[in-house]
Image (spheres, helix red, strand yellow):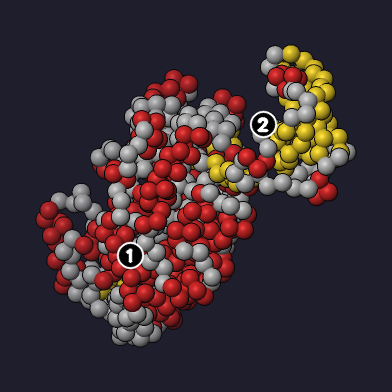
Amino acid sequence: MKDLNEIKLTTTQRKIKEAFNFESVEDVLTNYPIRYDCYEALPYSEWKIGETLRFEAITLGKSRSFGYGKKTIVHFEVMVEGQVIDVIIFNRPWAKTLPGQHVITIFGKYNGHNKFTAINYDLKAMKDHKPFEPIYRNKADFQQRSIHAFMEKVLSECLLEQEDTMPATFIDKYRLLSRTQALQSIHTPPNKRALNQAIRRLKYEEFLRFFAHLYLKNEDTYCEEKQKKNIKNDYIQSLIHQIPFVLTKDQGKVLKEMIQDMKSTKKMNRLIQGDVGSGKTVVAGISLFACVSSGYQAALLAPTEILARQHFESLQALFPKEKKKMMLLYSGLNASKKENILNDLKEGNIQIVIGTHSLLQSGVHFQNLGLVIVDEQQRFGVQQREFLKAQSDGVDFAVMSATPIPRTLASSLLGGMDVSTIQSMPKGRKAPITKRIEENSFRSVLKDIQSLLDKGHQLYVICAAVNKNENGFKVRNVYDTQKNLAKLFPNYQVGMIHGQMKSQEKEKVMQEFYDNQTQILVSTTVVEVGMNCVNATGMIIYDSDRFGLSTLHQLRGRIQRGNNQGYCWLLSDSHDELTIERLEVLVKSYDGFYISEEDLRLRGPGDILGLRQSGLPSFILGNLIEDTAFIDQAKLDAKSILDHPETQENQTFINSLLKERLKHGYS
Ligand code: ADP
Ligand code: MG
């Protein structure tokens, strides 16, 4: 097959190739049009009021105009199927001089009563246009004409040699177009029907590949059998009585599911999903103690050291009687203390260890590990499967995630995992009031912020960059923001924290904020996980359009820690419709499930599921929320292909998946 570099391009075409970042022929072929201008004629009798349409007519040479220069309105008359249509067009003064008796094609909106508002027109017959003119996204100020020429060049040289690895069984079964036909039709559709067929074929293929990759990845499941754990109900009750609040119904339900798993001979392999603040930690805690009571060791792993420490401290406070059973392992420990802990773990003298994810990968040995709970916090990575395989036999495993996985994806993404959901929030919890501010500045809410501080509450200020000019020069950065705020609020102390700081420094800054020595904390998303400051009730997020919805939702979870009403201000000067729609999701909803589904719908799966790093293919046409029928079918078909690798056609398809993996460098 041809390499993109072998194709002779003009200077402009080379510029297009660069601007669009096209590296392979495949990149070009899958640069599908974002929309089409339709040049199919609609008979006059079928015009509906308010509809956008295109028609061919004859000019009558009669016109009137109002205004002048850039602000003109021109009326002119045309004849279509014996009807005189009064056309109005804005800001095209030259339309006044349209000659009579000329063929014209007009595009715009029908207002009823033979009145039409034109958006544009040209003096060509309908048949001299392609029936569907593709419009491509534009990465710079290229003319559509030039982009078309580039696309046509690549299509004409490469389309015919496209390989079709889709098993013929499915092509026949669903009467799909061949890959070549589909690509041809999506770029230059001869009519609406061909376009729909092309989209259908290409969309189905995206889903089929996605799920086949996923199943291929999850194929090697591990041994399911283990020894039952002997856990006494009385002991669980005594643990529940120690905590200073009543468990919510969902916490109780999930806890029961975990205990049942441990008591059974089947290994626990469970995802616990619950929104920020739903109270996952306490459920994890009781499960850890329950495991220990049956004579095993247990481990709780967090993504960062700060978070591990926080889990440790929360559990110490919640279960005063069990304090001695827990140990915190962190990198700042001196060598001899660390060695003691590792030794005690090996000998079975320590029952519960709390640390970071790296804990089990760094040559730590347990005497008899019975339960591992991983706190993933903001996203559910696909990685921990690898991690799981490295465990000793008989270990129950659970992962906690605050990003709920949309229902359409849960079963296939999680392989054989069971899912527990904590949906209800503890009583008295108030969702933060979220406002979208249409500039990247908080001056319009300065008063609110001042009064929040004057009430003795604290404030987070989130930036998308640490240093100047990082992520684009207009993006607010931590350093400058800290300086500016210190000037603006001379009566308050302003702290600063970001991921590039040493962990000891970070700990110190956080401690100062907890202790209310600083009242304003300027930060990157490092506070997304790990801050639990009850007195902080305000959050300003600069450049909020730069973050994913799930991340923003996590961030504002920081100001929902106590019973005070929190306020979150999302600042952004973006006028992009999609961006505004995304941010509005947060203004309207505090439902983590809904938010992650919207994130998925609007941004695709990459960010939310941590899939980007895992290299799974992404979707161009497919939509994981809307295309449920495609998804269900593609899942079944992907499975059947992988179940029957012996047939030639399935083998060809699987080989193409493996090639893709190799190419993108993931295993
Ligand atoms: P997350 O699910 O985000 O990890 P946490 O476990 O950190 O949530 O819990 C958030 C806060 O809610 C903690 O301060 C915790 O002690 C408190 N909490 C948990 N469960 C309850 C409950 N049933 N009633 C009242 N407060 C609770
Ligand atoms: Mg948590």
Numbered disc 2: secondary structure: strand
Q: Quadrant of the N terminus?
A: bottom left
Q: Mark 2 belongs to which amino acid? A: Asp
Query: Quick one: label 1, few (<14), some, or many (20+) residues within 10 Å?
Result: some
Q: Mark 1 belongs to which amino acid? A: Ser
- Quadrant of residue 579 within the rendered picture: top right
State the separation of the CA atoms marked 2 and 1. 46 Å
Residue 107, compared with residue 357, is above or below; it is: above
Horizontal arrangement in the rendering, residue 297 relative to residue 437 (left or right) = left
Residue 422 on image: x %, y %: 52, 65
Query: Quick one: label 2, few (<14), some, or many (20+) residues within 10 Å?
Result: few
Residue displayed at 45% across by 61% down: 179
Residue 150 marker:
none
Q: Using the image as rendered, state which of residue 474 and residue 523 is in the foreground.
A: 474
Residue 641 on image: x %, y %: 39, 75
User: Given the current orientation, which residue lies at the most extreme front position?
Assistant: 101
User: Given the current orientation, which residue lies at the most extreme top position?
Assistant: 68
Tag 2 residue: 122
Q: Quadrant of the C terminus?
A: bottom left
